[in-house]
Image: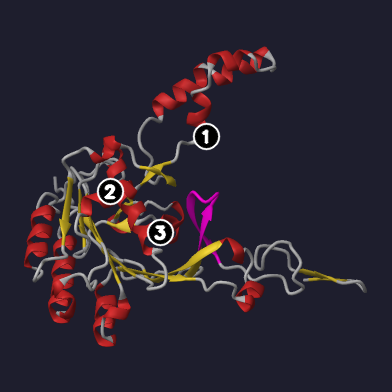
Amino acid sequence: MSVTKTRTSSFSRNFASVNSSQIPGLKHGPNGTMFISSGIPDLDKILGGGFSLGSLVMVMEDAEAPHHMLLLRNFMSQGLVHNQPLLYASPSKDPRQFLGTLPSPAVPKDDKSSHRDPDQEKGLRIAWQYKKYFGENQHSFDSQGGKHEFCNEFDLRKPLERQFLSGKRIDCISIQDSPNLVTLNDCCATFLSQFPSDGSISSVGRIAIQSFCAPQCEFSNMEWDMLSFVRSLKGMVRSSNAVAFVTFPPNLLSPSSCKRWQHMADTLLSVKAIPDEDKELEKLLTGYQDMVGLLNVQKVARLNTQVPVILEATTLSIKLKKRRFMVLECLNQAPIDGSSGSSYGTTGSCSVSSKSGTLDF
């Protein structure tokens, strides 16, 4: 009796033995792709699930505002919450101090209601038959859903708890005094060797490199050496169960080198500051006063398929909800008459009303 073998694509990974429910922070995607979260729920939705495992993510910084730090902090915090090993490289003298600025995951509303004071609960003037919903049922739900979410919402005003920072799975490297990139390349190779892509995943790693090619680094003028490192890093990450997240200031590179760096990225993002009191932009966009910056999605990783990604919008506004939580929203055109109301493109009606009559089609 013949046994038929499943035919897999030559450029697709074999994750047949992977159970994403047993590995926190890992999710199955189409065409055998595995995702880890960016730490921003809205960005995960835009990218189709998150950052593809084995991909190189690059963020182009803005010289006028450090909005790239919001993306970097959430990416690092999400990995630490999921107990994923982290390698962090920074041009600062003591990179470990940066860990104290990482945000903490917000407490869901369900968890807040489950920790209600019993004395306060007795004072609630509600019908007795509704009291059961605040007791046993709520507790059982929390006990079943005690696992970490795939993507948390992080409170930017609350620092990450020490229990996530006290582990031995965090490596910090200072690239300020490095005369070349040999040390950084060796550290990345040693770190990624823990996560071989052999068809089974026991753990997932994250690499975060902040402000690569910054002026503080002695190798900032070695453009070809830096390009070789980016190419080497991409190759090492592609053959491992990890994701590399690199931010760099494009204004410090030559135009040709900047184009090459953008071409090397699997997922390419860029951030931009919003000019203060731009009257013309304020008239064009709704919610302009709440925006802190703009995020542009220039490229989305497609590792196991040749089908291109078509996004609804490539430029999104960065907002801080309650000045605590980072959200991304599509840019909406303000009403022509300047009145408040639903933004452009949000209504599904195809009718136009006027004083003289109504035209429906």
Instruction: Tell us which disc is closer to us: 3 or 2.
Output: 2
Looking at the rendered structure, the kind of residue marked 3 is: Gly
Looking at the rendered structure, the kind of residue marked 1 is: Lys
Relative height, residue 4 to residue 284 (above, below): above
Residue at position x 77%, y 71% from top? 361
Which residues are the magenta region?
Answer: 318-330
Instruction: Tell us which disc is closer to us: 1 or 2.
Output: 2
Mark 1 packing: few (<14 Cα in 10 Å), some, or many (20+)? few
Residue at position x 73%, y 74% from top? 336
Percent of width and height locating residue 100: 30, 46
- Distance (Cα) linking label 1 and label 3: 26 Å
Mark 3: which secondary structure? loop
Residue nearer the viewer, 278 or 76: 278
In the rendered image, which quarter is residue 133 located in? top right
Residue at position x 54%, y 14% from top? 118
Looking at the rendered structure, the kind of residue marked 2 is: Leu
- Distance (Cα) linking label 1 and label 2: 27 Å
Residue that label 2 marks: 99
Mark 2: which secondary structure? helix
Percent of width and height locating residue 337: 77, 73
Residue that label 3 marks: 48
Residue at position x 50%, y 29% from top? 112
Q: Which disc number belongs to residue 109?
A: 1
